[in-house]
Amino acid sequence: MAHKVEGKGFFKEATVEDFPAFDVVTVNSDTLILDAFKALTGHGIHSAPVYNTNTKKYTGFFDVADMVVYVIESLRATSGPDVEVPAEFGNVIELIEWVHRHDCEAVSSIVNISQRNPFKGLSPSACLLDALELLSTKGLKRLPVADLETGLVTKLISQSALNRYLLKHPDAYSSFGEDTVGQISSFHKAVVSVSSNAPALRAFELMMKHDVSAIAVTEPVARSKRVVGTISDTDMKAIVRLSNLSLYGVTVEQLLRRIRPDKVNFVLSVTDQTRLVDIPAMLEKHKVHRVYVVDYTANLTGIITFKELMAELLLRVKKTYVDWS
């Protein structure tokens, strides 16, 4: 039996009220940067809204990506002929304490410094199509939903949360039909990567330079690159658990072996023959936001991020004006 194709009707009728509310971890704008970072890692979260208690307004998100940019820029600013950067830190907290040993800045000073997580709120009555459109727009990874009476954020609609919701509705991705990765030219492009033998800090510098949240870890094979792993800004949270930390003296591979020894070479990849409709479940199963496109020899030929997949879905939903039985 043919699947029903969900078009605009489904995406306009469903609202963000269908998503569960929960206690959203919030950081006050006058919280010190180090304490804000400890709040993220302590709760095991990637991002938190920043709230100004004086104006009674949210000023943005504080994200792990902001922390990556802050540390790298601070290391650059404080390094020089008259400043000796320690070869090793007891842990990443000591590194951050060293970075802002002169200036104890509040988290408000680096809100969205990475420019990867703008604060764009949604009304509780907003439809699913609104959420889909915003999350497939560059820079938006999560959408805060505020209570209309208190103005306080009661839920966050993240990329992963949207994907989980859509996967509960079997036909939500049916507009992909039987189309495959090979049919979408935009999925085949140069991929930001770092050699497994490069200094670990280089990986985070490349994320900042290219405005991405993750990069492929590769090894050279003939004239191409074979992807052997991935490293993301989320790994900054895992680094907190490390002792005797050195971002200069260890390679990317060595760092990955320390923070996730059981998944050093884990790569979620697809080929040109993979169906688009199968990718959302893969992302949810492995709790990742991207898959790499490889050829039959595992050479890297492209990447599909969650945002790009949602953009493709949005394009098809907007072209489908009716639900077909």
Image (spheres, helix red, strand yellow):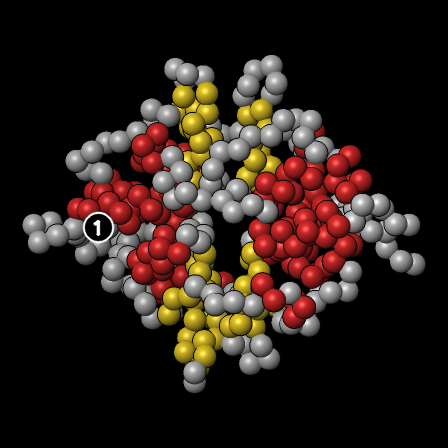
Is residue 47 placed above or below 274 in the rendered structure?
Answer: above
The answer to whether any part of residue 235 appears in the image is no
Q: Residue at x 61, y 18 (%)?
A: 148
| Side of 56 where 325 appears, left or right | right
Q: Position of residue 58 (x, y in %)?
A: 46, 25
282 vs 117, nearest the viewer: 117
Which residue appears at 64% of the width and 65% of the height? 184
Quarter where residue 61 is shown: top left
Image quarter (top left, top right, bottom left or bottom right) of the N terminus: bottom right
> 205 or 228, which lies in front?
205
26 up-or-down from 256: above or below: above
Other residues around mark 1 within 10 Å, as few (<14) / some (14–19) / many (≥20): few
Q: Please state if 297 lies on the left or on the right of 174 as rendered.
A: left
Residue 219 locus on image (x, y percent): 42, 75
The residue most toward the left is 82
Looking at the rendered structure, the kind of residue marked 1 is Arg
Q: Position of residue 176 (x, y in %)?
A: 74, 58
Say if 91 sits above or below 102 in the image: below
| Residue 106: percent from left, percent from top | 30, 29
- The secondary element bearing badge 1 is classed as helix
Most foreground residue, 190 or 277: 190
Which residue, as the protein is rendered here, is positioned at the far bottom?
A: 222
Residue at 22% over, 38% down? 100
Q: How many marks?
A: 1
**Which residue is disc 1 drawn over?**
76
Q: Is residue 63 visible?
A: yes
In percent of the image, x 46 and y 28: which residue is there?
26
Closer to us: 189 or 240: 189
Is 76 displayed left or right of 33 in the figure? left
Q: Quadrant of residue 112?
A: top left
